[in-house]
Image (cartoon, coloured by chain):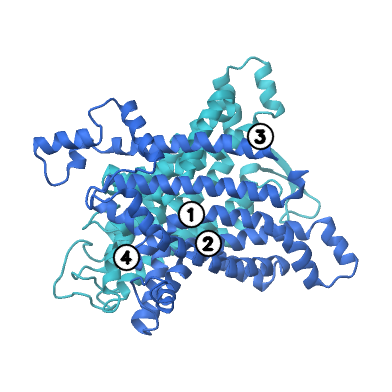
Amino acid sequence: MAVDAILDPAAPAGVVVEQSRGKRIWRRLLRRRSAVAGAVFVAFFVAVAVLAPLVSPYDPAKADWLQVRKPPSMAHWMGTDEIGRDVMARMIWGARASLLAGVVSVTIALMIGVPVGLLSGYCRGWIDHVLQRITDALLACPFLILAIALAAFLGPSLTNAMIAIGISTVPIFVRLTRGQVLAVAVEDYVEAARAIGNPHWRIALRHVFPNVVPPLLVQATLSIAAAILAEASLSFLGLGQQPPAPSWGSMLNTAKNFLAQAPWMAIWPGMAICAVVLGFNLFGDGLRDALDPKET
Amino acid sequence: MWGYFLGRLAIAIPTLFIVTIIVFGLQHLLPGDPALALLGEDRSPEAYEQVRKQYHLDKPVPVQYAMWIGNALTGDLGASLRTKKPVADLIAEKLPVTVQLALMSMAIALLIGIPTGILSAVRRNSFWDYAANVLGLSGQSVPTFWLGIMLILLFSVRWGLLPASGYVSPFENLGDNLRAMIMPAFVLGAALAAVMMRHTRGAMLSVLRSDYVRTARAKGLNERRVVLRHALRNALIPIITLGALQLGQLLSGAVLTEQVFTIPGFGKLIVDAVFNRDYAVVQGVVLVTATAYIMLNLLADMTYFLVNPRLRG
């Protein structure tokens, strides 16, 4: 692990303290209040999603015809929906669908985009040309329209929505990885690795790839935010999570028909989407600044 | 100059070619036999054979593609399975509505995004800068369809000021058209304004640090003149390019906005087509959107080249 000598403001005057790069990044990240706030938002929603069976006050799918469209009360903190289901219980279980969609879609995009970008940037030549034209073509199809088309042809379900969002996100990671590989491949240590006879796969995986990871981490965080928004959009259109399973997007789709009678049905899911997306965006922005070597 | 243009065109043409392969390939994602999926209600053997023949599914895939692209090049994108109308006609009918929405959204985005971006850069690290950044980040985090629902709740349900849905042609009644379009345009423009704000701020900060701005200040010009006449003029170049590129993204955003406000545009066409399993329309919309995006990209590149003297030199 790289070790740098820096002045620690907490240490006695003039004492030079050696810190690992990881610790330095961590300290920079903690200094950014917006990044910490973002991390707290994300951690809260992750905890809610993981602990859903324990913290959910009611069964999210159980209808209660005596409690149809009741406003927030002590019994139902966020009110009830058009068939008497508890909105808070559906919000809690809906967090699972949103976070799962965000993480799984970005994992799919990383698993395809990073190897393709690595291959494209490292091999150059005709392979690079062909892969970049395919990437250009995918980038030319607006993200949501491509995701809608894929979800439409694959069939509406949460799994297919995640695949559609993942595939639509692939070109972003191809471009980013390729750009980073092109920059890293001309570094002296890569030349040195090549000069001592390392095979190409070893140079690409052991020497180039680790240096591409930091910007990928930042992009992955920001892409999770975009994927959560995309899943909510697809579910809103009826192409994601299917009823009666809860999802914030599908809750909003139903809520728009009852705006005059039950506005609370629309307010909470939208606020939750905003909070979790803002959380990932703030954390991603903070991570980018913390990983930037120009930042002190 | 022509070399540059031809170079960009040489990239755009193969990209467009690959887009056509992707769009054509979509129908092969259909689970099972595409002919069965395209059949609809009538699943008799005669209807099955007719669909296979009509969509050339009885021919090898490369031949199917060649026939499809040949027709697409002449403007024939097939016919809607549901309405039997030509897809090209359906798109031509809906596109003007979405173009109006996109242009109004762009105007709103420019009116909000550029001044806040300038203010944020000129007053760096001040309250205005933080406020603009919070607004910018919020604009990127709020789902457009939720913002639309909230505006309907306030302006239509609570205050009764604007219609919650529907569309009136501007040729029929311009006032009613604007009343119906202002909320959707604001919803779509708000997200874009956030992007514009962040880019304007970045471009202005970089220009404000340049030598010619320092010289302008040293000559004793007042700050307003330095910012608006010297800095903004150069900072606007990348913003104009971004604006052209974002028009393509607006088509994407229009899908959700048109759904919320029930506007019969391009976005609603694709969503309705998805639910009617009208695959020819879905393919047509994706193809037209991607082609428009590539053309706008090309146009943006050329504009950037023409307005930037350093590239021309």
Q: Compared to A12, does A183 lie above or below? A: above
Q: In which chain is the residue bearing label 1?
A: B
Q: Which residue is mark 3?
A: A183
Q: Position of residue B61 (x, y in %)?
A: 31, 27
Helix, strand or loop at disc 4? Answer: helix
- Picture quarter containing residue B203? bottom right
Q: Which residue is mark 2?
A: B192
The residue drawn where x is 69% and y is 26% is A189
Chain B, which colour?
Answer: blue
How packed is label 4: few (under 14 Cα within 10 Å), some, or many (20 or more)? many
Q: In which chain is the residue bearing label 3?
A: A
Q: Is residue B33 visible?
A: no
The residue drawn where x is 65% and y is 42% is A21
Which quadrant: the N terminus of chain A?
top right
Q: Which residue is mark 1?
A: B249
Amino acid found under the numbered disc labelled 1: Gln
Chain A, which colour?
Answer: cyan
Amino acid found under the numbered disc labelled 3: Ala
Image marks 1 and 2: residues in contact by CB distance under 8 Å = yes
Image marks 2 and 3: residues in contact by CB distance under 8 Å = no
Helix, strand or loop at disc 1? Answer: helix
Q: Compared to A55, does A126 lie above or below? A: above
Q: Position of residue A272 (x, y in %)?
A: 39, 64
